[in-house]
Image (cartoon, rainbow, N blue to C red):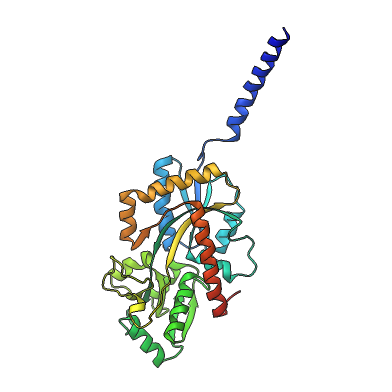
Amino acid sequence: MMLQLCLMLIGAGAAIAAPQAVAAEPPYPNKPIRIIVGFPPAGAADIFARLVGQKLTDVWGQPVVVDNRPGAGSTIGSEITANSTPDGHTLMAVSASYATSAGLYKKLKYHPIDSFAPITMLVSSANVLLAHPSVQARSARELVAMGKASPGKLTMGSAGTGSITHLAGELFANMAGIKVTHVPYKGGGPNLNALLGGEIQISVASLPASLGHVKAGRLKALGLTSVKRSAVLPDVPPIAESGVPGYEAKNWYGILAPSGVPKTIVAKLNAQINEILRAPDFAEAIAKQGAEVEGGTPEEFRKYLESEIAKWSKVIKAAGVQQ
C-alpha cells in the first residue's frame, strides 16, 4: 500500500513538473521581433537589417520590424538594446561605427562587449570616397592635389563624429597630407543627402548606400577604401592605388542581442541568419549592393568586435577626437 502511494505521489509530481518545464522555455519567436538600427533610414546598416528582417519574417512567420534610433554615433540605439528584455525579440544591427563609438565616448551607459550577446557578422564592404559633381577632381589623386593647393577649404561630411566614415575620411586626409573641414551629420542617409544637395564637397560613405547615386551620375566616386576593386564599380580604383599607398578602411555589419539572451535562442538566431546568408538569392542581392557575405559563429563575431574596438580606439586617440 505504501509503495502504491509513493508511486502515485511521484506520478503526480511529474505531472505537475512537466507543464512547468514547458512554460520555462516558450517557443521562439512568439511575438514580433524588433531590429534596432542606430542610424536613420537609407544607410547601409538599415538596408541590411531590412533584408535580413524580411527573410526572418518569411521563415518564422513573425513580423520583423526595423526601429531606427539615430544619434550619438549609434550609442542611443545601443543603450536601448542593452536595456531591452533579453528574450531574443529585440536585436540590433551594428556597423563598424559601433566599434568606433566604443573608443570615442568616455562615458557610455553600457559596456560595448559585456552588455551584448553577439549573434553573427552579416556582411562586409568597402566605403567609397565621394564628391559632389561640382568638384573638379576625378580621382583621389586629383583630390589630394586640390587639398594641398587650398588647405582646409574642402568640406568633408560624415555619418557623425567618430563614425567609421568620419575616421576613414580623417585617415585619408592624414595619410594624404591635406587638411579638410569636417561636417558631421546624424547618419549615413543625412550625410548623403547633404552631399547630393551640395552642402558639402566630399565624403566617405558606405558603398551599398551610395552605389545607386554613383551609377546615376548624381555623385562621383573618386576611390574605394578597400585594397581591391569592386565588381560593381570596376573602374574605380582603391585609394591605395591612387595617391595614398597603404590606405584601407573596411566596413562591416552584424547583429547583436542584449546580454542574457538564452544560449538556445542565440544558437537559433545564429543558425537561421547564417542559413539566410548562404542562400543564393540573398548572396546575389548582397553582391549587387557591392558587399560580401560573412556569417560565422557568435564567438568569432565577439573576437572580431574586440579587435575592431582596439584598432579604432588607437586611431581615435591619435586623432584627438575622443568625447
Count of labels shown?
0
Relative to 173, does residue 127 appear above or below in the rendering? above
* Farthest residue, direction top: 1
Relative to 276, does residue 323 appear above or below in the rendering? below
* Farthest residue, direction bottom: 149
Q: State the image coordinates of residue 132 (x, y, percent, origin top left).
A: 35, 78
Image quadrant in which the C terminus is located: bottom right
Q: Nearer the viewer, residue 297 or 239?
A: 297
Q: Is residue 73 visible in the rendered structure shown here? A: no
Q: Is residue 153 left or right of residue 139?
A: right
The residue lying at 44 percent from left, 59 percent from top is 46
The residue lying at 35 percent from left, 83 percent from top is 243
Q: State the image coordinates of residue 256 (x, y, percent, origin top left).
A: 52, 54
Image quadrant in which the N terminus is located: top right
* Farthest residue, direction right: 2
The residue lying at 38 percent from left, 82 percent from top is 244
